[in-house]
Image (spheres, rainbow, N blue to C red):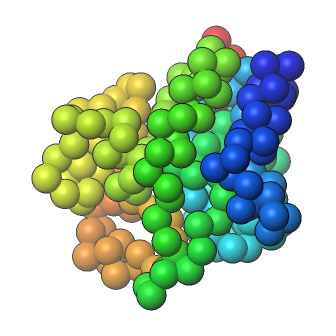
Amino acid sequence: MTSELTRIRLDLVDDPANAWATELGYQPVYQAAATARIAIIGQAPGKRAQQSGVPFDDPSGVKLREWLGVTDEQFYDPRLFAILPMDFYYPGKATNGDLPPRPDFAEKWHPKILAELTDIRLTLLIGSYSQKRYLKGRMKPSLTETVRSYQDYLPEIMPLVHPSPMNFRWQSRNPWFASEVVPVLRDMVAKALSPP
């Protein structure tokens, strides 16, 4: 981590808006290095990831690494992958699933971190929160249509559905994702990770 990225992390932890998380003993869950080639922008860490301090430390992460065609070692190498959720802290439990990420968190912290990541070749937008922020007016009417129209955003961006096991119904209703999108995703990831 560069000294600037280290300073940003310290500022983030010291931000009064994150004092509640510090009081709970939480550390921000993300990874970034100046040499990262792929940025993964997800939702927010789940409870298990927050406890371990490791992004995607759950069945969703296993599925995501399978989609990407990478090893655990590659995925957790910040020199290859920057993992920047829309909020770096577990937001708590909702009636169904987890609460959404705080709407102002990514707006405040992502630009500072991404400004230091000068070698990003591919950005993966996982789920509707990241797609709404980073695609803005370019989104389709639904997440499904946005993901199905992934070619409209290549080669810099690829929108994806969340790899959560809770999405098994979506995946069974949309078999084109596994047959059409995942092979292209793996190819894009391999190209982004290959030497220049």
Report if residue 195 is visible in the image. Answer: yes
* Quadrant holding the N terminus: top right
Tell me what residue is drawn at x 44 percent, y 85 percent.
96
Quadrant for residue 5, please give it: top right
> Residue extending furthest left?
141
Q: Is residue 140 above or below residue 144?
A: above
Q: Is residue 109 above or below residue 181?
A: above
Tell me what residue is drawn at x 41 percent, y 75 percent.
167
Looking at the image, residue 28 sits to the left or right of residue 159; the answer is: right
Looking at the image, residue 168 sits to the left or right of residue 137; the answer is: right
Tell me what residue is drawn at x 22 percent, y 42 percent.
139
Quadrant for residue 74, please give it: top right
> Residue extending furthest bottom?
95
Tell me what residue is drawn at x 57 percent, y 59 percent.
44
Where is residue 145 drawn, in percent x and y?
A: 19, 54
Comparing 12 with 45, the one in front is 12
Comparing 141 with 107, the one in front is 107
Where is residue 174 drawn, in percent x and y?
A: 27, 69
Where is residue 92 drawn, in percent x and y?
A: 60, 74
> Residue extending furthest front?
16
